[in-house]
Amino acid sequence: MLKSLTIGSLVLAHNVVLAPLAGITNLPFRLLCRREGAALAFTEMVSVNGLVREGVKTLALLKSCAEDRPLGIQLFGDSPSDLAEAARMVEGYGDLLDINMGCPVRKVVGTGAGSALLQDPLKIAAILRAVRAATALPLTIKIRSGWHCGDDVYLEVARIAEAEGCDAVTLHPRSRSQMFSGQADWDKIREMKKALSIPVLGSGDLFTAPDCLRMLQETGCDGIMIARGALGNPWIFRQAIELADSGSCTPVATVERADTIVSHLALFTEDCGEAVAVREMKKHIGWYAKGFAGASDIRRAANAAHTTSDILLLTERIRAVSDDSCRIAE
């Protein structure tokens, strides 16, 4: 089920990729997931208003390095001309361009961007036409099924994307009104795959390696995009590859969990300095510290961390936990 994936001129080693996540998929996190096997990683959402009006400050979100390739850049906005201009500005920073048409959060949809665009397919067509004319990079979109439950426009939007020169479409099959509640309707991914000739990627409710392979098998999609399932769980990429190759995957030991937190902290410190690294690692430890005895105490202690040493002491506590004492969640 895992196979190479071609999106326009970009050829990926396999078809399991890391989704763009606001406030999460910065350079340190992308590098961590790449080392665990992600074939492609995306920047955080980048505001076209910020790019066009602030320039250098917003371009900082595109900070990358040689190990961080191939890189997808995700833009959000609602103006065809601004999105086209932003596409021209970022073309030298990445290998693929994605337009966010699925983000459900209020501060994004309130500007007319993200999933708010699903209410206006004609504007979507205008945006894609303008961006396609502005860049030669592989162009994709990420969408939801619609604005309200039952108000499904995903097939219409996907056909528009294909007609306007997009190279792939990613579907998270929930409506905007659902946010992240309920269950993602993977049947919609299967329907989209049948309707398009360009690659279709599926997203939504991918939290374990078996979830990943099940989506590929059940929907026939060309690839999968892991989002929330990678939080505190970068091993999901490696495990999906192992499961596809051998039928089993290696469980994550508490020692590996501790080692990964140390690596994540080091990457953050190198990129942003100690103060930012420690602050950011607090929320990540909230995700890493699950599924083993004493995890809730670790999460509480992380909130009081102020220095690198504080974080490293927590990793030693995790390292000391016996794998035999692990349980599903705490």
Image: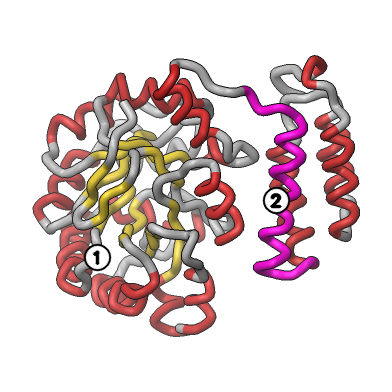
Q: Nearer the viewer, residue 128 or 3?
A: 3
Residue annotated with mark 1? 137
Residue type (three-letter) at the residue carrying disc 1: Leu
Q: Nearer the viewer, residue 231 or 176?
A: 231
Label 2: how many Cα within 10 Å (few below 14, some 14–19, many 20+)? some
Label 1: how many Cα within 10 Å (few below 14, some 14–19, many 20+)? many
Residue at x-position 53% and y-position 33%: 236
Q: Main secondary structure of the magenta part?
A: helix
Q: Are marks 2 and 1 in contact (CB under 8 Å)?
A: no
The magenta segment is 251-274
Using the rendered view, name the quadrant where residue 183 is placed.
Answer: top left
**Above or below, 311 relative to 251:** below
- Left or right: residue 164 versus residue 9 is left
**Above or below, 199 relative to 205:** below
Using the rendered view, name the quadrant where residue 130 is placed.
Answer: bottom left
Label placed on residue 263: 2
Residue at x-position 88% and y-position 30%: 320
